[in-house]
Amino acid sequence: MGRINKKAVEIFKSDPNHVISKEWIKTLQYQVDLFAAKEIKIMSRLGLGSGGRPMLDLGCGIGAFSKALRKHFPSQKIVATDNNEAFVTIFRNKLLSDPDPLTELIKWDTMNEATPPAVRKCHTVVMRLVLEYIKDPVAMLLHLKQCLPPRSLIFIIEEDDYFFQIHPDLDALWKVVKTWGLARERLDFKKYFGRQVPCVATNAGLKVLHAELIGHTNFDSDLREMFDYFVATMHLLHNHLPREIDPKEISQMERQFREYVAQNGNNCLLIVPYILTVAQTP
């Protein structure tokens, strides 16, 4: 946990007004540190980065996934956009301290602002955990389709709770999944949206080329860090839903996770499911 926590603190300090909570930044960084490398490897096999043309990280947030893309594509231009001023400020401060001349950061509201010229040159788009926050994802993809060159590839990654698995069983995991589902209802967003994306993309006039279940496991990532990520999300959700999520219950989950690791080590299987959809513009 310490390695990721240090990264979260560094990012948090780069937000001068502390608009984004430390817990929120921590969960964003956890996501990428645990899962990005495997996702990028799979997407590369399906055409991400082919031809060396600019790629768009749409909904880039604090820039964690853009940085992961840079590790895999060191000489390729990345255009990173987000409509959240606080996220963009954090990312811009990171670029000031660690310059990357091949990354262009733009604050852009896809639905309500003119398309930047740099975006129109991107033949590849990555949207990681973006559509779950969009009120009308079909309308958003319809608009995005008009912003891109013909036959552009759009890689969409979203979570999906249906395929969660753990063996031997662990009650704390299912409590986490249930709490995430509660948050989805209370906070009105589309977590566990993955299985719907191929239909959404088709309804937006895109051609779906591929859909794949990405099962992140404790053989890809450290089991303790995966559990730490779950606990971090619980603390984050408690800040938004203090009446529904009891800190004592979070502490109990954390204790169960520690006991599970002590008892089983890596002699177990945890699957954290994401759905990758690859679509193409006409």
Image (cartoon, rainbow, N blue to C red):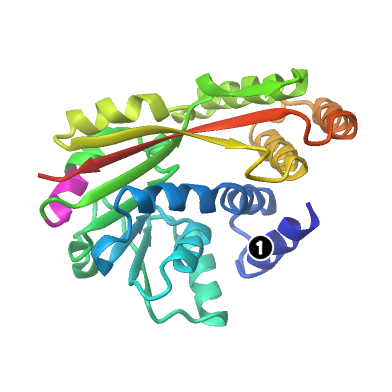
Question: Is residue 102 positioned above or below 270 on the image?
Answer: below
Three-letter code for the amino acid on which mark 1 is drawn: Phe
Residue to which mark 1 is pinned: 12
Q: Nearer the viewer, residue 262 or 193?
A: 262
Residue 42 on image: x %, y %: 42, 47
Q: Give the answer, above or below, for where 19 lies relative to 105.
A: above
Q: Main secondary structure of the magenta part?
A: helix
Q: Which residues are magenta?
A: 143-149
Residue 205 forms part of the magenta stretch: no
In terms of secondary structure, where does tag 1 sit? helix
- Which quarter of the figure has residue 98? bottom right
The residue depicted at 23 percent of the width and 62 percent of the height is: 122
Callout 1: few (<14), some (14-19), or many (20+) C-alpha neighbours within 10 Å? many
* Residue 220 shows in this picture: yes
Location of residue 233 (image quadrant): top right
Where residue 200 appears, as percent x and y from the top left, is 26, 29
Vertical order, 247 against 114 (above or below)? above
Q: Nearer the viewer, residue 276 or 51?
A: 51
Q: Which x, y percent locates residue 106? A: 35, 67
Q: In the drawing, does residue 238 fall left or right of residue 40?
A: right
**Residue sitting nearer the eye, 226 or 193:** 226
User: Quick check: is 148 in the magenta stretch?
Assistant: yes
Q: Residue at coordinates 68% horizontally, 67% vertically from top-left? A: 10
Quarter occupied by the C terminus: top left
Residue 244 makes an appearance in the image = no
